[in-house]
Image (cartoon, grey):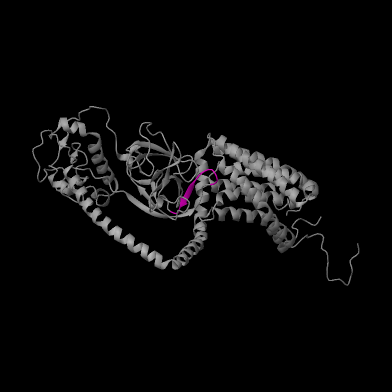
Amino acid sequence: MSVDPYSHWRPDQSSGPALAQRLDRLARRLLPGGVTALVIVILAAPSGIPGATALLPGLVMASVFFWSVWRPASMSAPVVFLVGLLMDLIGFAPPGVDAFVLLLLHGIAAHTRFGLMGLSFLMVWVVFSVLATAACWLLWLLISVLSLNAMPMAPTVFEVLLAVGIYPPLAAAGTWAHRRISNPEPQS
Amino acid sequence: MIPVSIQIRQALERVWLPAMLLLSIATILLGWANQRLTNAARMAVADVLSPVWAVIAEPGEQLSAALSELRGIGHLAQENARLRSENETLRGWYDVAVSLTEENQTLKTNLHWMPDPVPSFVTGRVVGDVGGLYSHAVLIGAGPQSGVRVGNVALAASGFVGRVTETGVHSARILLIDDVASRIPVTLETSHGTAIMAGDNSMIPRLMYYAQDNHPIEGERVVTSGQAELLPAGLPVGTVHYVRASTPAVVPYARLDHLTLLRVFDFDSGTIDSPDAPGRVPVAPLRMPDAASGRGNPMDGMTLGGVVDGISGHMSSGANGGNGKGQSPSASEGTNGDADKKREDGDGQSGMSDEGSAGGTPGGTPAIAQPVPGRG
């Protein structure tokens, strides 16, 4: 490829993107994980929102699932782990439990992403509902086993319903952010 | 991104997920095996985040206050009429309360009532809801620096809320009474029964282990019981309500889902020791001046925490409490037969306790002393 001598644009192959560009890319990469962490922190404040504690797992699951399918570079496994650990530490759950369940969800979503991306929104929602239900009950099982005490089941049902219900608005917001904020992945 | 070849990057991406899954399993096992480390990590996170939460909660509180004010404006006349009638009722109750207090005071004087030690307390703002889905707990912005310790009792304006389970540097976690892990011994005021109030993650904790021939009565008051030395007796908890037939529950006075300010009391109940062995007669207990000098003192029991501070306050309150509750049988047989709280254990701490301030000279002959046979 020959360089046009009259062009002001000189592709400098050796140095790669400039520092500002890299920082910008990094910020965009960390945005979904950062927003999720921020939501976890904010929902733990005494805001008076009814059902905030039951809403949180569904919200985080929907966020992890959405970004794992549409942009796994922004929701990588370490980010998912850190988000889950933060959730455990703030919620005084057995540490690592949320991280484990979210990582499983992330793994399934990231591995089947090319199949999921071809499906219609409704089908993706159904798939997410099945996965979120399984994740909530796995969470219930793990917490019950680790505390050697069968936890009440009613909050889990509530949690599942909220997780299923929160996905469409979150997916709409995520799609907007996905289109608006350009692809942070290296152009490929 | 650090520039690496595509092959290495793909290999790394394949390794990340299993590595993180293993790490999370390791975290689960480590957290399960080492609870102290887990608690330290949690409270460190809570300490860092509690100022953030306090800032976040501020506009919400102002908003809700403004909203309730707006709502109040609509019903001003109605509210005024209601308050007027309530005020009439309360005026009547005030007279009743004054006369009852007088009577209670007289009765207590006649009975040589042992005053409870006055608890110290700190008030903290609820800065975080750290419960999660399967537990109910709140974080307050007061820690060991302000005197909050594990095991202290938290009260909202209207009633008992929970106990401090973990403390950080400047925050403390309070396990609420509706948590599944909460078991509180309570007394039912009308039926005089005892029961255990067990949280079950709903807003109304169940009552368990009540006597089968003395069922809780719908609507009766529930207060804490002094058993198990966990809590002082008589803190208001709530009222009995039957959710279904034969499943009594407690409707707490405090609104457990909207807690804003909590008072954390240090009742220091651990200093009340039970007697060593039943029927043991203490060797030559010291008879200090007759209680006539001490009983009229309205500051009885109040001087311990305020005047004599530090260790001496704890020591003297412990000695008094032990004498009063533990050794009253021996007092009736070994001494003059009057339950006397102004006794001490011989030569120890006579200068430190409130005895010295009440009139006796430390270690010397008290002012109104009567001859004490056992003193040598």
- Front residue (pair A63, A171): A171
Residue A15 appears at what percent x and percent y? 78, 60
- Front residue (pair A8, B333): B333
Based on the displayed image, in which of its 4 quarters is residue A130 positioned? top right
> Is B323 colored magenta in this rendering?
no
> Is B135 colored magenta in this rendering?
yes
Q: Is B175 on the left-hand or right-hand side of B276?
A: right
Prevalent SS, magenta region: loop
Q: Residue at x 63, y 54 (%)?
A: A36
Q: Residue at x 60, y 46 (%)?
A: A159
The magenta stretch spans which residues? Answer: B132-141
Q: Is residue B8 visible?
A: no
Residue B81 appears at what percent x and percent y? 36, 65
Q: Is residue B292 visible?
A: yes
- Front residue (pair B208, A90): B208
Q: Residue at x 27, y 59 (%)?
A: B91
Q: Residue furthest right?
A: A2
Q: Is B64 on the left-hand or right-hand side of A98?
A: left
